[in-house]
Image (cartoon, rainbow, N blue to C red):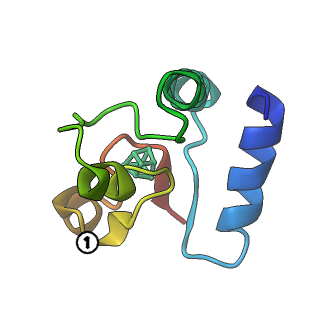
Amino acid sequence: MNKEQLRKAWENFTEKNDFILNPDRKHVDTIIEGVLINEKKHGLKLCPCRLRDRTKERDLELICPCNFKIQSTWKERGDCWCGLFVKR
Ligand code: SF4
Protein backbone atom coordinates (compact mmCIF):
# COMPACT_ATOMS: atom_id res chain seq x y z
CA MET A 1 0.00 0.00 0.00
CA ASN A 2 1.36 3.44 -0.85
CA LYS A 3 0.75 6.83 0.76
CA GLU A 4 -2.27 7.80 -1.34
CA GLN A 5 -3.91 4.40 -0.93
CA LEU A 6 -3.55 4.63 2.82
CA ARG A 7 -4.92 8.18 2.89
CA LYS A 8 -7.93 7.01 0.84
CA ALA A 9 -8.52 4.02 3.12
CA TRP A 10 -8.52 6.30 6.16
CA GLU A 11 -10.82 8.79 4.42
CA ASN A 12 -13.24 5.96 3.71
CA PHE A 13 -12.98 4.86 7.34
CA THR A 14 -14.15 8.31 8.50
CA GLU A 15 -17.13 8.54 6.15
CA LYS A 16 -19.85 7.32 8.48
CA ASN A 17 -18.18 8.36 11.68
CA ASP A 18 -18.13 11.40 13.94
CA PHE A 19 -14.49 12.11 13.08
CA ILE A 20 -12.50 13.13 10.02
CA LEU A 21 -8.88 13.02 8.96
CA ASN A 22 -7.01 16.00 10.35
CA PRO A 23 -7.37 18.80 7.76
CA ASP A 24 -3.65 19.54 8.21
CA ARG A 25 -2.40 17.51 5.25
CA LYS A 26 1.27 17.80 6.25
CA HIS A 27 0.51 16.33 9.64
CA VAL A 28 -1.40 13.44 8.07
CA ASP A 29 1.48 12.87 5.61
CA THR A 30 3.93 12.58 8.51
CA ILE A 31 1.75 9.97 10.21
CA ILE A 32 1.24 8.04 6.97
CA GLU A 33 5.01 7.89 6.48
CA GLY A 34 5.51 6.67 10.05
CA VAL A 35 2.86 3.97 9.71
CA LEU A 36 4.31 2.75 6.41
CA ILE A 37 7.83 2.65 7.88
CA ASN A 38 6.49 0.59 10.79
CA GLU A 39 4.77 -1.74 8.37
CA LYS A 40 8.04 -2.28 6.52
CA LYS A 41 10.00 -2.83 9.74
CA HIS A 42 7.49 -4.81 11.79
CA GLY A 43 4.92 -6.14 9.31
CA LEU A 44 2.06 -4.21 10.94
CA LYS A 45 0.66 -0.73 10.42
CA LEU A 46 1.67 0.44 13.88
CA CYS A 47 0.99 3.86 15.36
CA PRO A 48 4.06 6.05 14.83
CA CYS A 49 3.51 8.12 18.00
CA ARG A 50 3.43 5.51 20.72
CA LEU A 51 6.01 3.08 22.03
CA ARG A 52 6.00 -0.66 21.49
CA ASP A 53 6.99 -3.04 24.25
CA ARG A 54 7.58 -5.90 21.78
CA THR A 55 4.62 -7.94 23.04
CA LYS A 56 1.92 -9.14 20.70
CA GLU A 57 -0.76 -7.62 22.97
CA ARG A 58 0.82 -4.16 22.77
CA ASP A 59 1.31 -4.41 19.00
CA LEU A 60 -2.38 -5.22 18.58
CA GLU A 61 -3.27 -2.08 20.57
CA LEU A 62 -1.06 0.01 18.29
CA ILE A 63 -2.45 -1.01 14.91
CA CYS A 64 -3.70 2.12 13.17
CA PRO A 65 -6.53 3.01 13.36
CA CYS A 66 -6.58 2.04 17.02
CA ASN A 67 -9.46 2.16 19.47
CA PHE A 68 -8.77 5.85 20.02
CA LYS A 69 -12.11 6.78 21.55
CA ILE A 70 -10.92 5.32 24.84
CA GLN A 71 -7.94 7.69 24.89
CA SER A 72 -7.90 10.74 27.16
CA THR A 73 -6.96 12.91 24.16
CA TRP A 74 -10.24 11.98 22.47
CA LYS A 75 -12.26 12.64 25.61
CA GLU A 76 -10.53 15.94 26.38
CA ARG A 77 -9.69 17.38 22.92
CA GLY A 78 -11.50 15.28 20.37
CA ASP A 79 -8.34 13.96 18.68
CA CYS A 80 -6.66 10.58 18.59
CA TRP A 81 -3.33 10.48 20.42
CA CYS A 82 -1.42 11.47 17.25
CA GLY A 83 -3.97 13.94 15.94
CA LEU A 84 -4.61 11.85 12.85
CA PHE A 85 -8.36 11.75 13.46
CA VAL A 86 -10.23 14.73 14.84
CA LYS A 87 -13.85 15.24 15.83
CA ARG A 88 -16.10 16.18 12.92
S1 SF4 B 1 -3.48 7.21 17.96
FE1 SF4 B 1 -4.20 7.86 15.92
S2 SF4 B 1 -2.43 7.57 14.59
FE2 SF4 B 1 -2.06 6.39 16.45
S3 SF4 B 1 -2.88 4.36 16.00
FE3 SF4 B 1 -4.50 5.48 16.96
S4 SF4 B 1 -5.65 6.31 15.27
FE4 SF4 B 1 -3.67 5.74 14.47
> Can the viewer see residue 44 in this picture?
yes
Horizontally, residue 46 falls left or right of residue 61, namely right
Quadrant in which the C terminus is drawn: bottom right
> Where does label 1 land, which residue?
70
Up the image or down, 55 lies above or below 1; here it is below
When asked about the image quadrant of residue 36, the answer is top right
When asked about the image quadrant of residue 68, the answer is bottom left
For label 1, the SS is: helix
Q: Position of residue 85 (x, y in %)?
A: 49, 53
Q: Position of residue 30 (x, y in %)?
A: 53, 21
In front of the other: 84 or 23: 84
Identity of the residue drawn at 38% across and 67% down: 67
Q: Amino acid at mark 1?
A: Ile
Up the image or down, 14 lies above or below 54; here it is below
Identity of the residue drawn at 73% across and 41% down: 7
Identity of the residue drawn at 73% across and 70% down: 15
> Can the viewer see residue 79 in this picture?
no
Identity of the residue drawn at 79% across and 35% down: 1
Up the image or down, 31 lies above or below 21; here it is above
